[in-house]
Every structure is written in structure tokens, then in C-alpha cells.
Image (tube, rainbow, N blue to C red):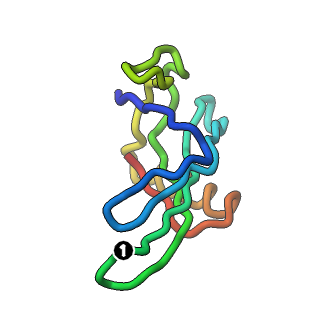
Amino acid sequence: MAKYVHLATGCEVPTPSGSYCLRKEVRLALDGQDLFYVLSHACVDASCCGATDFDTAIVPGFIVRWKQETNERGLPVSEVVPVTDETTRARISSLIKETEHISRVEFW
């Protein structure tokens, strides 16, 4: 089990090579469980290899507890079970790519 700290959507988070912005959080019913993923947009503008931007889906996993606590900064925290089965990952990846029209899906 892992804990996910929810950040505000729409805010820009600086990184060493640029920034990323969380666009939305999605809860998706799948096989009797709730799958959780986050869509983000990244901009790389301070890299030795040039500049680029891309959209990504990050899949923390299946929800165990949704926003049941807050951390020391007052941000909501959920508990998830990461998706480890490769067949399930492939199925989820295909579903997200088709639904969200993106090419990059990453799992915890």
C-alpha cells in the first residue's frame, strides 16, 4: 500500500529542467475497484538536449482510502495499491491512452 498526496490541479510545480502542471485527477471504475490516475502536462525548457513538452498519465493505483487524512501541509492524502501485474498495466495503459488521447502512461 502507498500514500498519495493530492496537489491542487492547475498549479505549476517547478522542476530542475522546467515545470509540470497537474491537469486533473480521475477515478475510474474497473473490475469492481476504483482506479486512480492523474493527468499532467510537463514543459522541459532548461535542458541540455533542447526544449519539449508532453502530457502524461500517472497511475498511483487502486484506491483503498480516498482523502481520509491530511498531511502536515494540510493536503489531502489517499491510500492506494499500486498496479503490479503487467497484463493489468497493459490493459489500463491502453484504456487511458484511448480515453485521454495521450501517449505516455506511467505506473507507481
**Position of 46 compared to 40: left or right?**
left
- Regarding residue 70, the answer to whether it shows in the image is yes
Residue at the image point whose x is 51% and y is 73% from the top: 53
**Position of 10 compared to 19: left or right?**
right
Q: Examine the rendered structure and indicate whether residue 41 appears above or below residue 32.
A: below
Residue at the image point whose x is 61% and y is 62% from the top: 97
Nearer-the-camera pick, 89 or 37: 37
Residue at the image point whose x is 49% and y is 63% from the top: 42
User: How many numbered dots are placed on residues in this image?
Assistant: 1
Q: Examine the rendered structure and indicate whether residue 7 appears above or below residue 43.
A: above
Q: Helix or strand or loop: what does disc 1 sit on?
A: loop
Residue at the image point whose x is 62% and y is 48% from the top: 10
Nearer-the-camera pick, 75 or 102: 75
Instruction: Give x and y (percent) for residue 64.
Output: 49, 22
Q: Quadrant of the N terminus?
A: top left
State the residue lying farthest toward the right: 99
- Disc 1: CA contacts within 10 A as few (<14), some (14-19) or many (>=20): some
State the residue lying farthest toward the top: 68
- Regarding residue 91, the answer to whether it shows in the image is no
Q: Examine the rendered structure and indicate whether residue 81 appears above or below residue 57.
A: above
Residue occupied by mark 1: 46
**Position of 16 compared to 61: left or right?**
left
